[in-house]
Structure formats: C-alpha cells, structure tokens
Amino acid sequence: MCDYSLHSVLSRPAHVGDQLTIRDFGTGTRGFAAAEDSSVAVCLRPGTELSFQRNVSYGKIGAFFPKNLEIASQTALFRHINVDCSHTHHDALEFPNGEVVLLTYLTEGQIATVLQLPADPVSAPVSDRNLVTA
C-alpha cells in the first residue's frame, strides 16, 4: 500500500529483489520509485523486509530541518503507523534498534532492495471431521 498522498501516482506492488529508490513524487511525500521507471511508485505491504546500500539517512522536509540524521543500520521493516488518522503519512520504516521513521523523511536517492515480502494469511482447510455441530 502506498501513502495517501501517492494515490494519484501510477504505482505497482513490490516484488522480492526489486531495487527501489527514494524519490519525491511532487505530491507532498517521498516514497519508493521503481528502478525501471522513476515515475512509478512501488507500494509495500507491512512486514516487507528491506536492505539499503548504506546506513539510512533522513531529515524532515523544509527549511527548518536542514540537517540530515543517520541511522546506523542498513536493514528495516516496512510498517504502517497512525492508521486511525486518515490525512497523515502512514508509511514508515522500523529499524533493528526500534526506531521508526516516516518514509517521507528519508533522504532522496537512497537505494533499497526488497529482501522478503510478508506471508499472505492462509486459512486452514475445513474438513467434515473438523466441523463442530450443535
């Protein structure tokens, strides 16, 4: 799923092995762009595992936050936060040290590889022997 401000941008789901680049889509948010077309947002599902080429750099957008910060990690899990607030950013990365950073704060140009997608929930098959009847 992509953040609310990327709904008007052409998008596709992430696949294992994708090389993704942090990009400003001109919609008020940054997100992952496809390697084959930088105008295509790549949407991740919560639980997707990522590996960056370098330690992750981030900073809030705007003149009041000119300094970028760095997290001493190259791996992260994609998460959704603030899901009860409809008009706020939800896409975030959780790092091994427990720090959570909104995806829109990541510095442009960073490259990440999709290592693993979350498992799809699977329902157990129901057989006649497992049915409970009153």
Image (spheres, grey):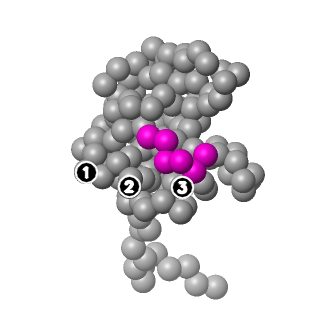
Q: Residue at x 57, y 32 (%)?
A: 105
* Mark 1 in CB contact with mark 3 (< 8 angstroms): no
Q: CA distance from mark 1 to mark 3?
A: 18 Å
124 to 56, vertically: above or below = below
Q: Residue at x 61, y 18 (%)?
A: 66
Report which quarter residue 23 is drawn in. Answer: top left
User: As rendered, which of 113 and 129 lies closer to the eye?
Assistant: 113
Q: Is residue 35 visible?
A: yes
Q: Position of residue 107 (x, y in %)?
A: 48, 28
The main secondary structure of the magenta stretch is loop
Which amino acid does the dot numbered 1 rest on? Glu
Q: CA distance from mark 1 to mark 2?
A: 8 Å
Which amino acid does the dot numbered 2 rest on? Val
Left or right: residue 112 versus residue 66 is: left
Q: Residue at x 31, y 25 (%)?
A: 53
Indicate yes or no whether the magenta region holds residue 33: no
Which amino acid does the dot numbered 3 rest on? Leu
Q: Which residue is mark 2?
A: 40
Q: Position of residue 122 (x, y in %)?
A: 41, 64
* Mark 1 in CB contact with mark 2 (< 8 angstroms): yes
Q: Secondary structure at mark 3?
A: helix
* Mark 2 in CB contact with mark 3 (< 8 angstroms): no
Q: CA distance from mark 2 to mark 3?
A: 10 Å
Report which quarter residue 100 is drawn in. Answer: top right
Q: Which residue is mark 1?
A: 36
Q: Which residues are magenta?
A: 23-28
Q: Which residue is mark 3?
A: 6
Left or right: residue 19 versus residue 33 is: left
